[in-house]
Image: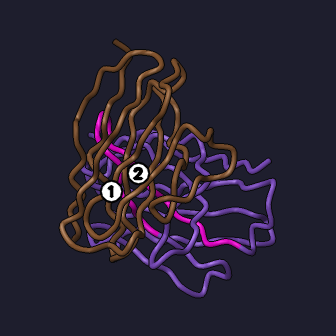
Chain colours: A purple, B brown
């Protein structure tokens, strides 16, 4: 059974940093691209970043480029999202997802999410 | 960015009814479209990909169709467990974009 479990969320002040982790199990992690998708409170879904199966390629939405870094450790089956210079508009539930390739990506498995609140 | 316009924003239907949710893209997305179901308090789950392919484990009462800029999700014989929000997503162009969602309730 595919399982994705996020951790590392919480309350953080604007301008500070936070690192999210996602532990994956139930599939061969190193064979799949992975992504982070977020959802602000009572809002819709927003793709954040994707990393290729081997970590050689990364992709970001414009609003997080230069501030967020997606990475992975295939030996540990773990995905990461380093978030720097956080803003109030980054407040959201962050979902770890397994990414499947079409032209770009759709997401066939999702974790339960971890909440990030950026506030002073 | 490609804009995904979903309709209706909310919908109330009776058990056993057939429900259709529409999604319109601001340009041709060549069937690179997925549908997700999000039950209250839960994370989204993939229902449909490539506009009309059913994801593993999804009941056959769900179906997707469409092409070009117009797509739809149909739920036959509505069940109580189908109460949820539904989102479309295009993955033809960078960045992936989602519709605003349709909230489905029971009448």
Q: Are marks 2 and 1 on the same chain?
A: no
Q: How many C-alpha atoms fall within 10 Å of the one at disc 2: few (<14), some, or many (≥20)?
A: many
Image quarter of residue B32: bottom left
Tell me the distance, in whole angstroms, between the alpha carbons under discs 2 and 1. 24 Å
Q: Which residues are magenta?
A: A32-49
Q: Residue at x 73, y 56 (%)?
A: A24
Nearest to viewer (mark 2 / mark 1): 1
- Please say if A76 is above or below B11: below
Tell whether position A4 is magenta. Answer: no
Quadrant of the snapshot with the C terminus of chain B: top left
Q: Report the side of A111 relative to B49 (left or right).
A: right
- The subunit letter for the residue under badge 2 reads A
- Which sits in the foreground, A14 or B102? B102
Q: Are marks 2 and 1 in contact (CB under 8 Å)?
A: no
Measuring from the top left, give residue B33's x and y in whole percent: 41, 63
Judging from the image, what secondary structure is the residue with disc 2 in? strand
């Amino acid at each position: 059974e595919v399982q994705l479990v996020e951790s590392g969320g919480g309350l953080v002040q604007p301008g500070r940093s936070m690192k999210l982790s996602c532990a994956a199990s139930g599939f061969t992690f190193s064979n799949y691209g992975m992504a982070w998708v977020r959802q602000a409170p009572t809002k819709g879904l927003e793709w954040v970043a994707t990393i290729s199966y081997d970590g050689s390629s990364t992709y970001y939405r414009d609003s997080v480029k230069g501030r967020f870094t997606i990475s992975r450790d295939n030996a540990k089956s773990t995905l990461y999202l380093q978030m720097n210079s956080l803003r109030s508009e980054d407040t959201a539930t962050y979902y770890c997802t397994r990414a499947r390739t079409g032209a770009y990506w759709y997401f066939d498995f999702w974790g339960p999410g971890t909440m990030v609140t950026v506030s002073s | 960015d490609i804009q995904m316009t979903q309709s209706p924003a909310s919908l109330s239907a009776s058990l056993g009814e057939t429900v259709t949710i529409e999604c319109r893209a601001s340009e041709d997305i060549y069937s690179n479209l997925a549908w997700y179901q999000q039950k209250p308090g839960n994370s989204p789950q993939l229902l449909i990909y490539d506009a009309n392919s059913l994801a593993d484990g999804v009941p056959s009462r769900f179906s997707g169709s469409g092409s070009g800029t117009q797509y739809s999700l149909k739920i036959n014989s509505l069940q109580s467990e189908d109460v949820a929000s539904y989102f479309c997503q295009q993955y033809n162009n960078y960045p992936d974009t989602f519709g605003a969602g349709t909230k489905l309730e029971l009448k």
